[in-house]
Image: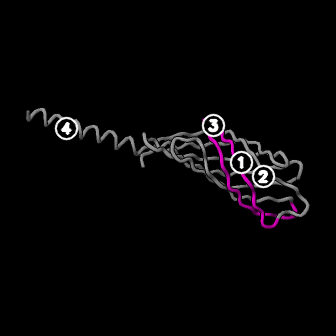
Amino acid sequence: MRVLLFVGILFTFHLNAQVARFDNLRKIQTGPYFGLQQGRNVVIELGMERISKEIKWKSPNAFGLNAGVNFDYRARVLGGEIGSWFRPGRMSFTLGGAIAVRSDFNDVMIGLAPMLGYKIWMFHAFVGYYFYPTPLPNAQTNQLFVSLRIMLTQQSKWKNK
């Protein structure tokens, strides 16, 4: 009976050690993204993104940071943005936002954009709205938009928390 109790306790500690090590893993992916944004005009996007995913059985979250440039050919507006998004749990819906800077090479405008999206595999589709406190006087650029980005993973690594 004592041997059975000892083996049971030893087995329990062994399982606990395996679960604790597995719960602390993160997968970090980095790479370029290419995208199209459709609103009033079509905008081409290029940038870099870094995604950090939790690897666990219950409620794995993901978090992404991105920085990129975009060009609105019709309005002749060049822009840059820095953004982030968060995916709670196993659902592929993402919540995010971006800070955008746009210029028509004469004036500059800065804006904020909250976003709601859906991410699956390497595709990230989202909808958002740019709030510009002082818009460019002669440029009609996107405010309400839908965007599709494709991220190509260039580097992927595993990390313990």
Q: Which of the two discs, 4 and 1, labels the residue nearer the N terminus?
A: 4
Q: Is residue 133 magenta?
A: yes
Pointers 1 and 2 in contact (C-beta within 8 Å): yes
Q: Is residue 89 left or right of residue 108?
A: left
Three-letter code for the amino acid on which mark 3 is drawn: Met
Quarter-of-image position of residue 126: top right
Quadrant in which the N terminus appears = top left
* Residue at the extreme bottom: 134
Q: CA distance from mark 1 to mark 2?
A: 8 Å
Residue 5 rendering spot, x and y as whole percentages = 13, 36
Residue for badge 1: 127
Disc assigned to residue 122: 3
Q: CA distance from mark 4 to mark 2?
A: 59 Å
Question: Between tags 4 and 2, which lies in front?
Answer: 2
Question: Which marked residue is nearer to the observer: mark 1 or mark 3?
Answer: 1
Q: Is residue 10 magenta?
A: no
Please name the predominant secondary structure of the magenta segment in the image. Answer: strand
Left or right of residue 42, residue 146 in this image:
left
Q: Earlier in the sequence, mark 1 or mark 2?
A: 1
Q: Residue visible at 46% across and 44% down?
A: 59
Q: Which residues are magenta?
A: 105-134
Give the residue drawn at x 68%, y 38%.
150
The label nearer to you, 2 versus 3, is 2
Q: Which residue is mark 2?
A: 144
Residue matched to label 4: 10
Mark 4 residue type:
Leu
Q: Earlier in the sequence, mark 4 or mark 2?
A: 4
